[in-house]
Amino acid sequence: MSLVPRATYRLQLHKEFGFGDVAAIAPYLGRLGISHVYVSSWLKARPGSTHGYDVVDHTALNPELGSEQDFTAMIAALRGQQLGIILDFVPNHMGVGGAENAAWLDVLEWGPSSRHAGYFDIDWDPDRRYLRDKLLVPFLGSQYGEALRKGDVALKVDAEHGGLAVWAYDAHKLPVCPLHYDEVLRGTQLELARLGDAFSDLAYWQPQMAERADELKAELAAALRDPTTRATLDATIAAINADPARLDALIERQYWRLAFFGVASDDINYRRFFNINDLAGLRMELPSVFRDAHRRIRRWLDDGTLDGIRLDHIDGLLDPKTYLVRLRELSERPFYLVVEKILSAHESLRPDWPVEGTTGYDFTNQILGALIDPAAEPTLDAFYRDFTGIDTPFESIVHECKLRIMDVEMASELNVLGRDAGRIARQNPLTADFTRHILQRALRQIVACFPVYRTYIDGEGTPTEADRRDLDWAISQARRREPVLDPSVFDFLAALLSGELASAPDSGFSRTRALRLAMKAQQYSGPVMAKGLEDTAFYRYNRFVALNEVGGEPDRFGLSANAFHRANAQRAKHWPSAMLGTSTHDTKRGEDTRARLAVLADLPEEWTRQVQGWSRLLRARRGDVEGNAPPDRNDEYLLYQLLIGSWPVEMLDEVDAKGLETYGERIAGALEKSMREAKLHSSWAMPDEAYETAMQTFARDALDPERAAFFNSFLPFARRIAEAGVRNSLAQTVAKLTLPGMPDTYQGCEMWDLSLVDPDNRRPVDYAAREAALARLAAVADTDRAAHLRELLREWRSGAIKLAVTHALLELRSELPELFAHGSYEPLTITPAQAAEGELPVLGWRRVQGEVELVAVITRFPGRDTSVSGLAAIPSGVWDDVLSQRSVTISDDAIALDTLLDGLPVAVLVRR
């Protein structure tokens, strides 16, 4: 089996779709034509996890997915179809809270002396002195004192294992340090008092306290088998729980501090995944942590269970390059390796990273951009300003959102950076007067101005040219925005963040501390960018939400043919095995939803007229002719785009009450997430029920089956957009499966994917329907394929046309693996029939490997009232049309586009 997959198929595992379900669809996946299944994490996660990114044990399978036997059977079923396996692995963080993460519980129990204390990125000596040698546990839904009073926090005994723990909401386990068991056991019953005295003597057993404590816990468990002893302890615990002051006194002595979740933004003293309290960052740079986390991964690589790894959130690691080098050395068996890395438009993946490439967000936005007509930007820009009253540039929105994240949700991490920068500054008289406040203010502005997620200065302390470029940009912009700060402050921070301070000889500065701060700042800038851009600004700037995609730039309207071809040529040259994706578990909208929305740029004037009509209709119904009542126009405009993009195929002609109810629930979920992520009128921390109700009521009014006026206006336009969107979808599919790179199909997306933001994009997939559709395609393989494809295009609502194109091209990749793995790339010259302004509505490319060559042509801008005519420059000879299975003879090194396309919006020719 080749190191690089021909094509992958992504599966999201959870308790409703586990190992047995994967085994059941293995024959279908084999017939579809992929080479590898690419699965979400199957390691043990928190109970009920729908995504698997909250791993609690790297050495165990997730029991909700099945048993070890089920796992073995799944592997056998996939191997039986000659399918390889790529696993999604999460090196940056673990799920904490609950009662499942043994390492986390050990840290809570023993504090800094825990053997796992170094696993998590914890600051045991924070400025908040009440947290010295304590771990903040911000898992309460109310203030700590209120939770105590209401009995939401209670002491319990684990009679089976002899352990004491405080539980919050009967869900979060907080072990009591055995050194303090005596406070519970003393003065109760003779045997319990004896054990309490023994527990209080544990300090004598240092450094074997934990082992001795386990022995005493076993004795306590044995003693509790006596009903009288158990009843005595239960009564004591009940008395403690009934007295909040007594329970608080016990809690006060522990190595953890239980708190309201809102405290985290200011006082959190462990690194999180973004701002999520129950996902704690790992110190993967430590050899022991790396070894323990990869023990089972290594075994799966060595024994051939795994053929590749997709790494989640590579930017969260302290030193990504060193981690990747270690990972490559994990097994002598070669394996495919890609990283989830979001690249800015001017940014390239680091050439010295030992990976095959990224997971494809860059491609997602490149192909979408190529399908959006940039000529529509002025019209849509003006309408957005007029309709919503918003004229703030997107760049300014992002800057404002990043500042908000640092001020509200990730203030504690910034406080630590400011504190540590101040400590470093005081090491040299020249910088000793830079106060923490001044440095923190400057750091805040630098991070807000960062043009990329992060830089990658490592243990060597030497920035690359790209690092220096991005740092210089951020610092220059920060200087401009903070003119009251002395310029020397920015000079100091420039030297500190670039690693220059760490490398300067005899500077008086600690090289170790300076370099550590530079690397920690990199870990901070990434989450700030992600939360500020993807999870805030993307939900505020609704000008054209097809562009608001992970890895996208909403202010970059469309991508020219030249830019598209340059990106493909660069990938062919530098990262020919990078993953190409059009949908993932993280995309904001499904690939076919975006394909539909792209059509709106083909007819911007008509779209704006439709929106104005719908708004007047719906607001008049509510008695709000002036449009001043909530929801605001920005959220209203988002609703119309969501409806056009995701409107169910089965309701394009006629709506039904049940279908509208189901669809309305999906829209409500997407709107709730949009409002709360935008953090303007509502938020996850402080939901504004009045505003959210107004927005949801507005959406329900639009979807009310008893009121036909809106549907009479909406459905004809929705049908037109949906039909044109099909052509964009097929163009997107052909591009993914023929351009340089390794294509991935997200579960179910071989047919229509009209998803909204997660969790909508993780809905169950109807594999029975897909298997039946694939069987029907096989049954007509020997008929007039061209006529059949045109029929499928006319009957596009079934989704079979997309499946047919996907299957045909996956089979072609199987037949010609060398062409797709190593073939050259060059743009195809398209000559229009007559002079035209702007971008041509056709794109084409040619790939050659030895004697084999391929030509692919896709149409774009299907909403335009223009025909696709002209010539494509293709070498003379007899070519095979892969989709229609006809022979095409080309003379004079050119072919008419209408002949080439033969009634379809795409064409793929091969000559062998």
Image (cartoon, rainbow, N blue to C red):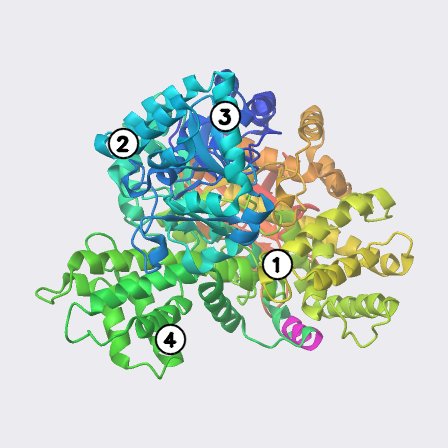
- Tell me which label, 1 or 4, sits earlier in the chain: 4
Q: Look at mark 2 in the image and give the residue it sits on.
A: 201
Crowding near the residue tagged with mark 1, few <14, some 14–19, many ≥20 C-alpha atoms within 10 Å: many
- Tell me which label, 1 or 2, sits earlier in the chain: 2
Q: Tag 1's secondary structure? A: helix
Q: Look at mark 4 in the image and give the residue it sits on.
A: 477
- Amino acid under disc 2: Asp
Q: Using the numbered discs, state the Cα–Cα distance from disc 1 to disc 4 in whole angstroms.
A: 29 Å
Question: Residue 599 appears at what percent x and percent y?
Answer: 68, 58
Q: Look at mark 1 in the image and give the residue it sits on.
A: 676
| Whether residue 579 is situated above or below residue 521 in the rendered picture | above
Which of the two residues, 241 or 540, is positioned nearer the viewer here? 241
Which of the two residues, 639 or 830, is positioned nearer the viewer here? 639
Question: Residue 245 appears at what percent x and percent y?
Answer: 49, 48
Magenta part of the protein: which range?
379-387
- Tell me which label, 3 or 4, sits earlier in the chain: 3
**Residue in view at x 52 percent, y 52 percent:** 144
Find residue 184 and report its image quarter.
top left
Q: Which of marks 1 and 2 is in front?
A: 2
**Residue in view at x 54 percent, y 50 percent:** 892
